[in-house]
Image (tube, coloured by chain):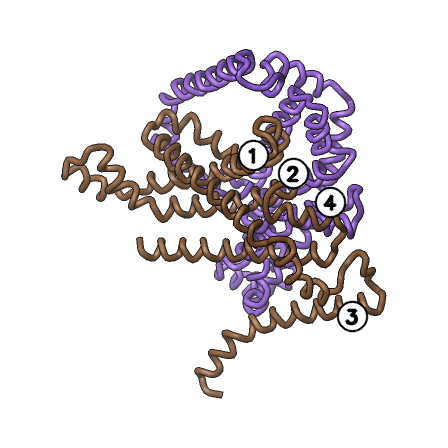
Amino acid sequence: MSPAGRATLQRCLPPLVGLSSLVLILAAVEILIRVGLINRFIVPLPSEVAASFGRVIVEEDILHRFLLTAWECLAAGILLTVFGIAIGALLHRVLLLRLACETWVAAMASAPLVLAYPLFLALFGRNSLTIILLAFVAGLAPVILKTIEGLSATRGVLINVGRSFKLTPAQQFWKIYFPSALPTIFVGIRLGLIFALINVVGVEFLINFGGLGQLINDLAERYDLPGTYAAICFVVLVSVVFFVATERAERWLTSAA
Amino acid sequence: MADVGRLTRAPARAGRAKPWQLPVALLRGAIVLTALVAWQIMAISGWFYGDVVPTLQLIGAALVKLLSTRDFYWNLWVTVDEVAAGLLIGGISGLVAGLVIGANKFIARAFEPYIYYLGPTPKIIFFPVMIMWFGIGAGSKVAMGAVSCFFPIALNVAAGMRQIDAVLIKVGHSFRANPWQMAIKIYMPAMRHPIINGIRLGLGVALIGTLLAETKISNRGIGFLVIQAYANFNMPQMYAILIVLFVLAIGANTLVARLGGLDTVKSR
């Protein structure tokens, strides 16, 4: 085999093995269910799950649900970007405030804030606002922390260049600090968006309201097993695509910086 | 509860940080006081529906009542039990998966993408499946905790395994260490921080997974108490439970980090 062919084989073989293993596991589950070793009223046939994708997409108005979930994520994303960067910049600018509050923000990142969803339900009602605000609160801490980290890592020589041009504080921020910190800030925004997506879908599922999360709850309550599994696969697919897209954007931004 | 980065180092050096301590403490006190006063004004202003924002006295009384009832500690124990079982099952599976993936490049390239991309998905959507498999009792909550913590632990262990200094491994081989000695004397000490970090992250998500499952369908545990307080519209009790829960979660997170020496790593 030529070196190029060997390199291609080395590159493609592991993903192929991974994919084949997945297919083999699904085939084994299909066989075990068909011979009665796994109860089909607990685990549906993988072939039934695959066949129910079309039904779920058409009958359950999945496009509308997807758009609703996407809108809630987008709204939460905009909120956490604007407030996260603003609070991060403020904490970076006012040292005393940063020393007083940064540990609190870090503690907030480790608190299970999503558990407060009944509180948000009582405060704002069972609607999209509750979901958006909860996703915003859950995703805020990483944006703040990464903004502080990015702004603090601005190279001294760049700051001195700004000073030598007698830039105003606002110009210094927008022309020096912000572009320099942007890749790190984006890492925070990406983390915040992932938290937002997790919380949006999770709260939709828990309060049985909204888009894709509610779909899973609906199908499970109807005991539509193949549909439930198909909807779960769909949500997993959406979150993987979302994760990959934000990861690519982060890589592009980091390489461009 | 993800690893969202490190606290940036304050500009003042440790030895010279003392002049900041008093102003920082005063500012913190002022912020807390302002927040409490603002809360009290909101509570007595009538801007919100009755009881949605209770007064500080009511929340304080609910907190005292909560902490002095046996029922709370029993439910807390149930949750701790479920989280611990979930962490144990998910942690051991994650550790094994991480070790296997981290030790073998071929296996890593074949299977790590699945773990990497499944990691950030919302795990609560698997709860209907867990109910089918393990019933509506503690089993489904333990399973939620285990599924939640498996991914961060596996990914951290795999990453930690790859970061071990090659010199340390060579030293082990040059002393003709057997696989067990290599694991105990070289790999595990070198991977202490990634493992502890994985457990810290895993603990956080296992707690969230278990508690959310308890709020969805359960008749015991802290999650059940939260949703019961909501159902009875007992807002002071709900605030009290959430305060205790957040304090416990943040405390557990800090404790694991301290025990594992992560705080010293971060400040280096």
Instruction: Name the residue tied to disc 2.
Output: A207
Q: Which residue is outermost to the bottom?
A: A1
**Label 2 residue SS:** helix
Q: Which chain is brown?
A: A
Which amino acid, by three-letter code, is at mark 1? Thr
- In front: label 1 or label 4: 1
Establish whether labels 2 and 4 are both on one chain: no
- In front: label 3 or label 4: 3
Q: How many marks?
A: 4
Query: Would you say the residues marked 1 and 3 are in contact, meaning their CB atoms lie under 8 Å apart?
Result: no
State the CA–CA distance, disc 1 to disc 4. Answer: 28 Å
Instruction: Name the residue tied to disc 1.
Output: A130
Q: Residue at x 44, y 38 (%)?
A: A80
Instruction: Name the residue tied to disc 4.
Output: B142
Q: Quadrant of residue A34?
A: bottom right
State the CA–CA distance, disc 1 to disc 2. Answer: 10 Å
Of the residues under marks 2 and 3, which one precedes in the sequence?
A: 3
Is residue B268 in view?
no
Q: Residue at x 75, y 20 (%)?
A: B69
Q: Is residue A8 above or below residue A212?
A: below
Which amino acid, by three-letter code, is at mark 2? Ile
Which amino acid, by three-letter code, is at mark 3? Ile
Determine the chain carrying the residue at label 2.
A
Mark 2 residue crowding within 10 angstroms, few (<14) / some (14–19) / many (20+): some
Q: Residue at x 52, y 59 (%)?
A: B162
Taking A102 as reference, is A216 left or right?
right
**Label 3 residue SS:** helix
- In front: label 2 or label 4: 2
Q: Which chain is purple?
A: B
Establish whether labels 1 and 4 are both on one chain: no
